[in-house]
Amino acid sequence: MPDRYDLPTGFRWGAATAAYQIEGAVTEDGRGPSVWDVFAARPGTVRDGHTGAVACDHYHRYPEDIALMKNLGLDGYRFSIAWPRVLPTGSGPVNPAGLAFYDRLVDALLDAGITPLPTLFHWDLPQALEDGGGWLNRDTAHHFADYAAIVTDRLGDRVPAWITLNEPFVHTVFGYALGTHAPGRTLMLEALPAAHHQLLAHGLAASVLHDRGLEVMLSNNLTPVEPATSSDADLAAAQAYDALHNRLFTDPVLLGRYPDLSALGVPDDLYGAIHPGDTDLIAAPGLDGLGLNFYNPTRIAAPTEPGLPFDFVDIPDVPHTAFGWPVVPDALRQLLLSLRDTYGKTLPPITITENGCSVTESTTPDQPRIDFMSAHLDALAAATAEGIDIRGYYTWSLLDNYEWAEGYHQRFGLIHVDFATQQRTPKASYTWYRDLIAAHKARHSK
């Protein structure tokens, strides 16, 4: 494989975070409650009852965090805007203090020479909208487009590119199908209208952003799906899972149609959610870039019990992260090649908008994270050598943060956060990434 520095001139180096995971200040300056505030307050939903009420206190400490980004040498910083901080009830009156925070954040990033890459929705739906049905309600898509207009009217003069949604698959499945994430619904496959309404929201918002001359991306969590064996039953199960996890959230945007979900027993109209013209609304704006969040491949077998038409099978004989996820770096290269094979000329340039791993605090000196990043950058370099247009890499995450239902137990950060004192301490992976970025820039400045 090419070495990890063999990436093109202009390749953008970044790090990523999300509002609820780092900001804290959930009741300050007019912010309304989100589904995660309500969900985390329910006993038994989050490990050890942890909430994001304080998180990394980034709302107050963002100047310190931006100084750490600048020292790291980042070209870009991917963050999310908290919808309930801007529109406390999801629609209606704007909260000026909420917009002012992101004004300050954007200006401070630009002053540090770092390009902001905001995500408009990273799972923190205003609770008032959830009370009206959340993503199961088609109106939420239109509220999202209105929210996108408000935010980009304020910040679009300084922020050229935007991500509409983060990982609609994960939000749909964990939040609406299985109930392990906010808002905690357990609808199984009948959660799929939430997927469609998120994609509709993307399409409506993308048109708003393009009307303002802004670039639009969508960040999907994608995984290469492999059958456990070569049996027909395992192959069919893998195809069914690939359609649900990957193609459900890329085919409508890039091809203007949904994949065949008949193996799941799902009706073509996704339980009445799809209206005439919807797929045109989703696809017509087009994408200026595809955000790819990659963590691990998935192995699938035919089901052993009634229910969904697939079972998950662990991948043996490979390292696993502290979260228990298998580490197979070349799966990223395979995924990128399969995207090109599937979508051809409709595939836009790709940015890795998340990639990282959880490492236990006792692991010294942070070598598993360094090995993880190094190997995945090697895979990116290999994919680039095979003609894949990859524009940048945003590691997850800048800071140890609130890891959703795991609370503060999974540490993904380049920077250690002592959640009792909020002290930030760069880890060995921070130094490694800083040196890698500097070496790449030095090599391409000659």
Image (tube, rainbow, N blue to C red):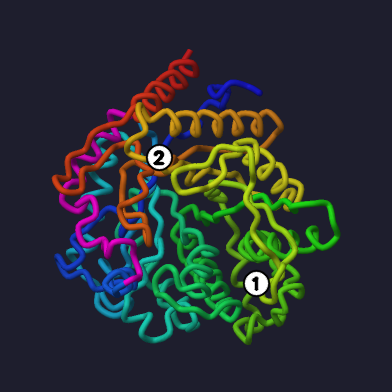
Residue that label 1 marks: 280
Mark 2 element type: loop
Task: Give the image location of residue 251, x and y in percent.
Answer: 68, 62
The residue drawn where x is 80% and y is 63% is: 236
Asked if residue 265 is among those painted magenta in the image, a careful observer would answer: no
The residue drawn where x is 65% and y is 72% is: 280
Dominant SS of magenta comes to: helix
Residue that label 2 marks: 359
The residue drawn where x is 64% and y is 46% is: 315
Of the image marks 1 and 2, the number of the one nearer the N terminus: 1
Range of the magenta residues?
A: 44-72
The amino acid type, in three-letter code, at marker 2 is Val
Mark 1 element type: helix
Asked if residue 60 is among those painted magenta in the image, a careful observer would answer: yes
Please give the label number shown on residue 360.
Answer: none
Task: Give the image location of residue 65, x and y in percent.
Answer: 24, 40
